[in-house]
Amino acid sequence: MLKGFFNVPTPVNEPVKTYAPGSPERKELQAALKEARSKKVDVPMYIGSEEVRTGNTHKMSPPHDHQHVLGHFHEGDASHVEQAIDAALGAKEAWENLAWEQRAAIFLKAADLLAGPYRAKINAATMLGQSKNAMQAEIDAACEFIDFLRFNVQYMTEIYAQQPPVSGNGVWNRLEQRPLEGFVFALTPFNFTAIAGNLPASAAMMGNTIVWKPAYTQIYSANVLMQVFKEAGVPAGVINLIYVDGPVAGDVIFKHPDFAGIHFTGSTGVFQHIWKTIGTNIHQYKSYPRIVGETGGKDFVIAHKSAIPKAVAVGLARGAFEFQGQKCSAASRAYIPSNIWGEVKDGLLADLADMKMGGTEDFTNFINAVIDEKSFDKIAKYIDNAKANPAVEIIAGGNYDKSKGYFIEPTVIVTQDPMYTTMCEEIFGPVLTIYVYDSERFEEALELVDQTSPYALTGAIFSQDRYAVELATTKLRNAAGNFYINDKPTGAVVGQQPFGGARASGTNDKAGSMINLLRWVSPRTIKETFVSPEDYKYPFLGEDK
């Protein structure tokens, strides 16, 4: 083992490329898209050192062009879950005993691979597989994951450097941050390639070995992430990538005695079921597992009467409709004061009228498709119910078509009922509901924001009045884990606004911070006494004279 206290390269946020017409990155990405569309990939599971092909294949298609086939992946069963667990446990000793700087080097290399030779490839895979436009793919698949890797390496070193400040005379106190005892299960969503990469990588960085199950609709880009991990030098068995049905995976994993923790992003319902299952099986585990999850939101924008109407309108347009509202942080409910509503409405409708909708390969399209037919049908039902309800008004959008792709127009609903369904329930699509409140009843509106939804992920206040900003910041303390002032509620950047929320939005372990990494280690304190006592007697035992 090398000797030295090593400093890792100081992390800085990866610059976001613009993909403007004529730029080299635009040409490179367009070429990568063309190449990816021109071939069909055969995607195996990666278990230990093996590429596992079962022959039970499922097609992968762009959500905006579901007739086109990008390739197929091989679905596994319970036996492959067992195989992945065995591989993770088999790799554990060597991986956790590897010097931390060697683990750091692997993930720093992964970051540089993504920043360089894999950038266009991972962005193209995300654009095609998840129907993200070039900018959304760039800030997600490339920049955010690069930042996760680089900043987490820095946080890892800071965690290891934290040591007891006091050692008494003749004593040396030390702190070891052990990997968890067992394997970690990473269960990742469709909507962010960066999350799909970070959930297994962050736990692996701290010396754990992983069973990783992505959403089926994200497997196309997950395959590219696995290629990056392998090229970066992640040893066989450290991250095992499997494609199995959720209940099949859960039935094996949550009964295994070596289950040490879950790193999850997905729906509240699924997470609550997982938590319940873990509780039921708690007596079977060697250790109490870490349960870390981010579980969605019903995210808000509230404007004060002093807010700049155009700024509010742009905040709503971007916050609600980027990536078709399929962000757990997307603005889906807004509270607009009556005095500025007319200007906000005009600005929002003008922006929506200017937005083009279509496939991601056409860079002029701001709006693309929702992820799959199931999601499409669910969102369409909310829109249909709104159309049939005389108490609400659809002022923009309301149309949808799944003949070629799963396209839903950006839809804006105005309601007179602040507790209307679409103000309360997470829809996960391009639907924004607005409640216009009396501009002189701001505090009452804040109470509505806080009490309407069980979620507490992101929220925003638009105001030019500092007293109103302070009041909203205080009153909404528990309504959002990420709070934005005069900005849309979707702007988390690693190292700047670590992401997470409480209530029904998750365990608030702040991805992109030291807080998250601390969940994947188990501290051990070590006390060394240099000269051991050789007499049991304490001074107080002496006789009075």
Image (cartoon, rainbow, N blue to C red):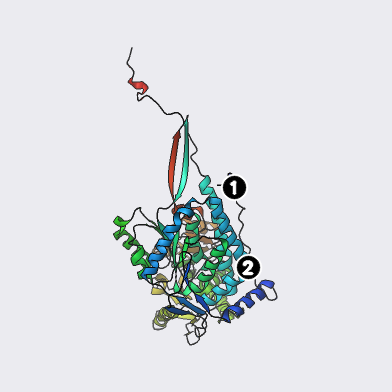
Looking at the image, residue 367 lies above or below residue 189:
below
Left or right of 334? Residue 101 is right
Q: Position of residue 276 (x, y in %)?
A: 32, 62
Give the label on residue 343, or none.
none
Residue type at mark 1: give it: Phe
Percent of width and height locating residue 290: 39, 56
Taking the view exactly as shown, the residue that stands out farthest to the bottom is 403
**What residue would you read off at disc 2?**
117
Q: Quadrant of residue 441?
A: bottom left
Q: Secondary structure at mark 1?
A: loop
Residue type indicated by callout 2? Pro
Q: Count how many numbered circles sit on residues in the image.
A: 2
Label 2: element kind = loop
* x then y, percent, for residue 233: 55, 60
Residue lying farthest to the top in this orientation: 545
Left or right: residue 22 compared with residue 180: right
Mark closest to the chain's N terminus, 1 or 2 = 1
Q: Residue at x 53, y 52 (%)?
A: 155
Q: Which mark is residue 6?
A: 1
Residue at left 40%, top 65%?
83
**Closer-to-camera residue (237/247):** 237
Judge left or right: residue 271 versus residue 61: left
User: Dividing the picture into quarters, in which one does residue 271 lie?
Assistant: bottom left
Residue plotted at (51% across, 71% down): 223
